[in-house]
Image: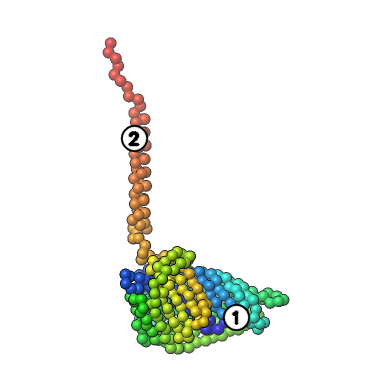
Amino acid sequence: MRAAAFAVFILAISALARATAASNEAVSGPHLTAGDFWTYHTNTSLAAGFFLEGEITLGVSSQGPVTIEGTSYNAVQMSVTGSGAAAGTFSTHLGVTPASGRWLLTGEETLEPAGLKVVSSVLDLEANGTFRTSSLAIPFLLSVQNTTTFRFLDDRWRFPAEIGNTSVVTGQMNFSEDSRLFYGFQNQTHTAGRVWWNVSYALETAIAVDSPAGHFDAYRIRQTAPDSGYALSYYAPATGNDARTETYNGTSRVTTNELVSYRYQALEPARFLGLTASQWGIVGIVAAAACSTAFAVWIRIRMRSRGPETGSPPRG
């Protein structure tokens, strides 16, 4: 698999990880908490004619100090997991061959706090299945490991940001990628390097978005890479992240992610001993009803234990 194809996949995951939230007049960074998560249905073209479909979940695992490429951050750590079906065609020594199977994604990403841009990414993708030729079925195993870090030299993309704000982030990307395709033959490649990475950000408009998780008021943010690839993120404030993202390679859409389920604790009701105020109210009503019932039963038992009332004997 070409490194460029996986780079688009990384851009798609990075677009998901970059969350934003809305205030009255501008878009501000969210209050992310360990335990927040977002699950997306994904449809990704990983290479020409080869597709991944399934679900990807991002989860906030922790927040704390880290140093990446010589810069210190109070960063947000995000876990990345996913799985699903792989299908399409693959270019092999046997020619263009139909393929089908399953895929599994694991990894983690680190986000800087000011603009929630990805500063470090470690992703491990595996797919296994079957190549189907005209005469036989051949099992295959595909694995790709990518490690990427960023060093920002000119970074003015900050929250809060108003609609119409644009900014170009200039920095260096340090990457290392190993890919391996085995199907009797083995094709293994390693690429690594440090390149300039200028990405433009634009907060374009407010827009309504429908996803499997519901209908949301959202903001569209465009993130454009130097190779003309770009991602559109539709951030829904009620979720603390994007309701939908789309990734393009410059000519066509290669990835769509739609929100299926989520937890954003910053907008959840306050809890005491694990229950919200309304839940405690229900507990109080039930407890009061139980006490009232118990008191009525106790009264009946006492009355029965006394027996029938007897009058005074008549006088002779």
- Going 35% across and 70% down the picture, which residue do you hit? 22
Residue 186 image point, x, y percent = 62, 82
Mark number displayed over residue 308:
none
Residue 166 image point, x, y percent = 37, 81
Q: Amino acid at mark 1?
A: Leu
Residue 95 versus residue 184: which sits nearer the camera? 95
**Real-space Cα separation, disc 2 to disc 1, in angstroms:** 80 Å
Q: Amino acid at mark 2?
A: Ile
Q: Is residue 78 above or below residue 280?
A: below
Quadrant assignment for the N terminus: bottom right
Residue 41 versus residue 214: which sits nearer the camera? 214
- Disc 1 residue crowd, few under 14, some 14–19, many 20+, Cα 10 Å: many
Residue 142, quarter of picture: bottom right
Q: Secondary structure at mark 2?
A: helix
The residue identified by callout 2 is 299
- Disc 2 residue crowd, few under 14, some 14–19, many 20+, Cα 10 Å: few
Residue 246 image point, x, y percent = 48, 75
Q: Is residue 50 above or below residue 212?
A: below
The residue identified by callout 1 is 181
Q: Is residue 39 above or below residue 179?
A: above
Residue 10 versus residue 310: which sits nearer the camera? 10
Q: Secondary structure at mark 1?
A: strand
- Going 36% across and 51% down the picture, which residue do you hit? 282
